[in-house]
Image: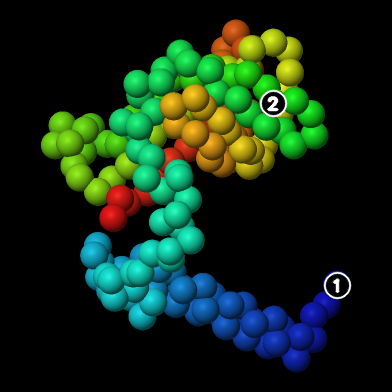
Amino acid sequence: MSTSRREFIRAGSLLALSAGLSLGLAKATLSQRKGAASPRNDGNIEIPQQSKRDPIFHMSRQTFTPYLNTTFLVDPGYRFPLETELVKVTDLRSATDQQRNAPGKDCFVLTFKINGEETLKQGTYQIRHDALGVFELFLVPTANKQGELFFEATFNRNIP
């Protein structure tokens, strides 16, 4: 199949233009310095009041650790709440941050096991606990090597 000179020049121009745009975006994205202010972030971000009123805003890894092996009720919204057990709290901070006990970083995973044969889809659910109260978590189904079903909630944030 032959390509006309006009089609060849048009295709080459579009290719060069798209390559230039993607390189420009890559440079803008990858050349940011750590801690550098961007046009949208001057380092003084105001946290919305609505976020501060959410119970989960004040919860950290240390909040959940004392409640390992206790019952949490998950409300699927269409039937009775399901009983789950908090079986693991995994610290995901780097080894350096863990050794320094770096303030301001909170990165962990809560792993829940449902008691019984019930299951949930990935989504946001209302959680109830006798000591922690009512809050919402985004739960993702996972399985271990033995095929047991678990649900995980991942936290990765800076603490103000």
Label 2: which secondary element: loop
Instruction: State the colouring used for the structure image.
Output: rainbow
Name the residue type under label 2. Answer: Pro
**Is disc 1 surrounded by few (<14), some (14 to 19) or many (20+) residues within 10 Å?**
few
- Give percent across and percent down for residue 77: 74, 37
- Give percent across and percent down for residue 20: 50, 79
Residue 96 seen in this snapshot: no
State the residue at coordinates (32%, 51%). Answer: 158
Q: Quadrant of the N terminus?
A: bottom right
Name the residue type under label 1. Answer: Met
Residue 155 quadrant: top left
State the residue at coordinates (53%, 18%). Answer: 71
**Is disc 2 surrounded by few (<14), some (14 to 19) or many (20+) residues within 10 Å?**
some
Above/below status of 27 relative to 138: below
86 with respect to 114 (left or right): left
Q: Which mark is residue 1?
A: 1
Above/below status of 71 relative to 133: above
Residue 74 seen in this snapshot: yes
Which is in the foreground here, disc 2 or disc 1?
A: 2
- C-alpha span from label 2 to label 1: 65 Å
Residue situated in front as seen by the camera: 29 or 124: 124
Residue situated in front as seen by the camera: 21 or 10: 21
The single residue placed furthest to the right in the displayed view is 1
Q: Quadrant of the C terminus?
A: bottom left
Q: Earlier in the sequence, mark 2 or mark 1?
A: 1
Q: Are marks 2 and 1 in contact (CB under 8 Å)?
A: no
Residue situated in front as seen by the camera: 138 or 135: 135
- Give percent across and percent down for residue 23: 46, 73
2 with respect to 146 (left or right): right
Report the residue marked by disc 2. 81
Above/below status of 6 relative to 95: below
- Give percent across and percent down for residue 141: 63, 28
